[in-house]
Image (spheres, grey):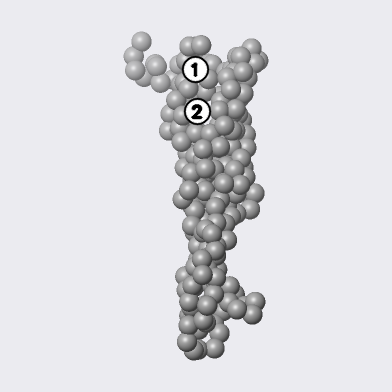
Amino acid sequence: MTALDEDFLPGEPPHRLGARELRADVPAGLRYAAILVVVGLPLGALWAFLAPVVHVVALPGGGSGSPAGEADHAFDAVAVHVLLVAAFGVIAGAVAWRRRHRRGPVLLVALVAGTLVGAWVAGRIGALLAWAASPVPVLVDPAALSRSGAPGGPVPAVLTSVPPSPGPWWVALIAGLAAALTYVLAAIVDGHEEMGRDGAS
């Protein structure tokens, strides 16, 4: 048979996953999703350690304000959470793709569900563990605060802090999206109809 014949003769039909194989993938998919949910616990603790607090100065008479630049820390805390859950999704997708003998739709669904719930758990755990510094008496110039007061000499005040927030619940969607994109892009690069799946158990 020549190379020309090989180009035009029909080859073997691509192997498609049957119901039996899909059912066999379910326990492995559930285990992987559970692992991803558990990973959300240390991920939330890591965010609580890295996220910056927002310092607030309480002035005599009930006024308050933040030193210059402190208001940006609220955004920084959410940005750190976004980066952590995005990295979580990419790594989870890459690890799922390495499970060659379980590649398929079942593992993809388990991957997305596990990263979504894991990222949500990370946000809730991070919010619980986020710390705030104890109040400290200080002397401040009211004009130096973001909510500027009248210029003058330093006045006694109390420096405290607000625990950081991981942001809204939908930040967890970033983890699921990153995981799905990683898995799908790996399948596209692989180029096989059966995604290079082998018969190992």
Q: Earlier in the sequence, mark 1 or mark 2?
A: 2
Circle 1: element type? helix
Q: Amino acid at mark 2?
A: Ala
Indicate the secondary structure of the residue bearing disc 2: helix
Q: CA distance from mark 1 to mark 2?
A: 10 Å
Query: Residue 109 appears at what percent x and percent y?
Result: 61, 30
* Residue positioned 39% across, 16% down in the render: 5
Residue extending farthest left: 2
- Residue closer to the observer: 136 or 123: 136
Which residue sits at x=56%, y=50%? 130
User: What kind of residue is marked 1?
Assistant: His
Residue at image position (61%, 40%) is 121
- Is residue 173 visible to us here? no
Q: Residue 147: image x %, image y %?
A: 56, 79
x, y percent for residue 16: 57, 18
Instruction: Depth check: give the residue in front, 67 or 89.
Output: 67
Vertical order, 9 against 35 (above or below):
above
**The label number, if any, that marks residue 161 in the structure image:** none
Location of mark 2 (residue): 96
Q: Nearer the viewer, residue 88 or 148?
A: 148
User: Which residue position is annotated with label 1?
Assistant: 101
Q: Residues within 10 Å of mark 1 (few under 14, many from 20)?
A: some
Position of residue 155 in the picture relative to residue 2 (left or right): right
Residue 132: give x, y in percent of width and height: 55, 56
